Image: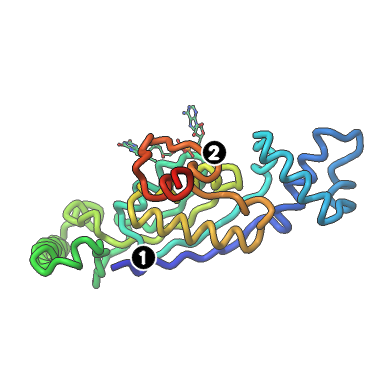
Amino acid sequence: MSSMKVTLLAHTPDPERVAAAAARQCYSKHSATKAYNDLSAEEMKRLLKMVISSGHLSVLEHASFTFVIEGISRACSHQLVRHRIASYSQQSQRYVKFDEIEFILPESISKQAEAQKAFAEGLDACREAYRRLLSMGIPTEDARYILPQASPTKIVVTMNARSLMNFFELRCCLRAQWEIRELAGQMLNLVKGVAPAIFENSGPACITKRICPEKRYDCPLWVELYKK
Ligand SMILES: Cc1cc2nc3c(=O)[nH]c(=O)nc-3n(C[C@H](O)[C@H](O)[C@H](O)COP(=O)(O)OP(=O)(O)OC[C@H]3O[C@@H](n4cnc5c(N)ncnc54)[C@H](O)[C@@H]3O)c2cc1C
């Protein structure tokens, strides 16, 4: 079961205006400051629509968003940090001792009593071995080697709008693993709340680019979108 909590901690003040002013700078002899102060809401939306649809996405890099993510597994955070165009600060297993560990339980396991039993037994053994190693004076940084991928973690992530779009294309995909898909979905909802003109059409590549990077044309979402 997921105890995921995602918070949008901070973002560029007026991210849409900043990106739109940067876009205007490219095509104007005036300063971006003027555009930032003078652009109407309609003009801003028009500019953003133009740059996004033409692939002039570098202007979106001026808007950044910082999230606090709690209660995801180490398996999920490992997938997350593969996204290199971002900044991360993750809770350290070297320095933080885990007294009570609530492991992340995938639904596929929780749905089957036998699987849940096997999972719980394995995790209890890890938990117990971790405690024993610490009680023997083994440093936390070495005792952690026994902790499983189901271990929960907390991580602060900052991504710019362009990198977020790429993240959403890959991780909102129906074929992405449930945990990172849930994470991406929550992050998308949060940024849509503060920058709708940038993110209104963000999502998996089948929606944004009408392509399936995995060429899985039997995917229910692809079928729903294009085969009906
Ligand atoms: C379906 C799926 C399966 C995957 N399976 C595996 C797997 O089996 N093993 C595995 O290791 N990873 C796997 N990954 C992770 C994947 O390879 C990427 O590391 C991850 O999705 C981050 O994507 P990204 O590189 O686009 O993002 P970022 O790292 O944020 O990069 C964003 C963009 O910047 C550009 N870029 C970044 N760095 C470079 C660079 N060094 N050179 C050139 N261009 C660059 C690229 O255009 C890239 O798309 C998988 C991802 C998906 C979605």
Residue, x 59% and y 58% (percent of image)?
191
Where 201 falls versus 53 (above or below)?
A: below
Tell me where residue 16 appears, x and y as whole percent: 72, 52
Instruction: Name the residue carrying label 1.
Output: 71
10 Å crowding of disc 2: few (<14), some (14-19), many (20+): few
Instruction: Name the residue carrying label 2.
Output: 209
Residue nearest the observer in this picture, 8 or 156:
8
Q: If the image is split into quadrants, where does the N terminus sit?
A: bottom left
Residue 129 seen from this side = no
**128 left or right of 35 in image:** left
Badge nearest the viewer, 2 or 1: 2
Residue nearest the observer in this picture, 143 or 214:
214
Amino acid, disc 2: Lys
Q: Between disc 2 and disc 1, whose residue precedes?
A: 1
10 Å crowding of disc 1: few (<14), some (14-19), many (20+): some
Residue nearest the observer in this picture, 148 or 95:
148
Residue 21 seen from this side = yes
Where 197 falls versus 6 (above or below)?
A: above
**114 left or right of 12 in image:** left
Where 118 falls versus 142 (above or below)?
A: below
Splitting the image into four quadrants, where does ligand 1 fall? top left
Alpha carbon of mark 2 to alpha carbon of mark 1: how far? 31 Å
Residue, x 66% and y 57% (percent of image)?
196
The image quarter containing residue 93 is bottom left
Amino acid, disc 1: Gly
Tell me where residue 186 appears, x and y as whole percent: 48, 61
Residue, x 37% and y 36% (percent of image)?
214
